[in-house]
Image: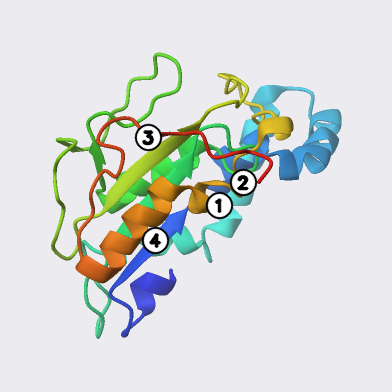
Amino acid sequence: MYLAVSTDVRSGVATVPGGPFGLLLPRSGDFALLYDVIRTRYASPVDRISLMAVLMELWCRMDPSSYMHAVSADPLPGTSAKTILINYGIGDAQVTWLGAHTIARSLGASMFASNVRVGNETLSGFPFLPDDAVVTGTGNNVIMGIAFDGTLPVPFINIPAAASTDVHGKVHKTPQSVSQRAQFFWQGQIVNPCGGPCISNFTLST
């Protein structure tokens, strides 16, 4: 939302972003206690989904995600198109990687061909770039995921990833992410700093 309305900022990085809440909350450890209350009151998964839909209908009146179309594709009056780089982490127990994918698709973001995958996940809805591509130009948004050695497998059901190996606070600290951001901000270029799938051995306890 900030980038969409800003008349000064021309580019930005979003690390571990996500949306919408109907997707994020059941998969977030931060929401676990409240979700337990909801599950107690609403035993049926269909009822819980319906409740989320109603809450989102109310939230959408002030949801920042409604500004996504204005970031690059259709800038607001008096603003210009912006460029966004998105980084996310496989094994994030607070904001699921699926939320980053949702935002990136809304922004028309591209993805490097060897982007990390969860299991046999098929990545769709993205224009894929060669791993040696150098992306420049306003509005050419890119999303890149990072997997971490030592994380527990990501659940394929609607629950949070393991809190014991949560990578939410690690993504922006990895050398790969730092290098990619530096080149983006200083040279206006987005590259794949890993040359292939980004798998970090950044110590989870750091």
**Could you give the CA–CA distance between mark 2 and mark 1, rounded to whole angstroms?**
5 Å
Which residue is denoted by mark 3 in the rendering?
198
Q: Is the residue 204 above or below the residue 197 in the image? A: below
In which image quadrant can residue 140 be found?
bottom left
Which residue is denoted by mark 4 in the rendering?
13
Which residue is denoted by mark 1 in the rendering?
57
Question: Judging from the image, what secondary structure is the residue with disc 1 in?
Answer: helix
Which of discs 1 and 3 lies nearer the camera? The answer is 3
Q: Label 1 is placed on what type of residue? A: Glu
Q: Label 2 is placed on what type of residue? A: Val
Question: Judging from the image, what secondary structure is the residue with disc 2 in?
Answer: helix
Q: Label 4 is placed on what type of residue? A: Val
- The residue at the point 27 percent across, 62 percent down is 184
Q: Is the residue 136 above or below the residue 168 in the image? A: below
Residue 80 at x, y = what percent? 22, 77
Mark 4 packing: few (<14 Cα in 10 Å), some, or many (20+)?
A: some
Which of discs 4 and 3 lies nearer the camera? The answer is 3
- The residue at the point 43 percent across, 68 percent down is 1
Residue 30 at x, y = what percent? 73, 45
Which of discs 4 and 1 lies nearer the camera? The answer is 4
Which of discs 4 and 2 lies nearer the camera? The answer is 4
Which of discs 2 and 3 lies nearer the camera? The answer is 3
Mark 3 packing: few (<14 Cα in 10 Å), some, or many (20+)?
A: many
Mark 1 packing: few (<14 Cα in 10 Å), some, or many (20+)?
A: few
Which residue is denoted by mark 2 in the rendering?
54
Q: Name which of mark 2 and mark 3 comes first in the sequence.
A: 2
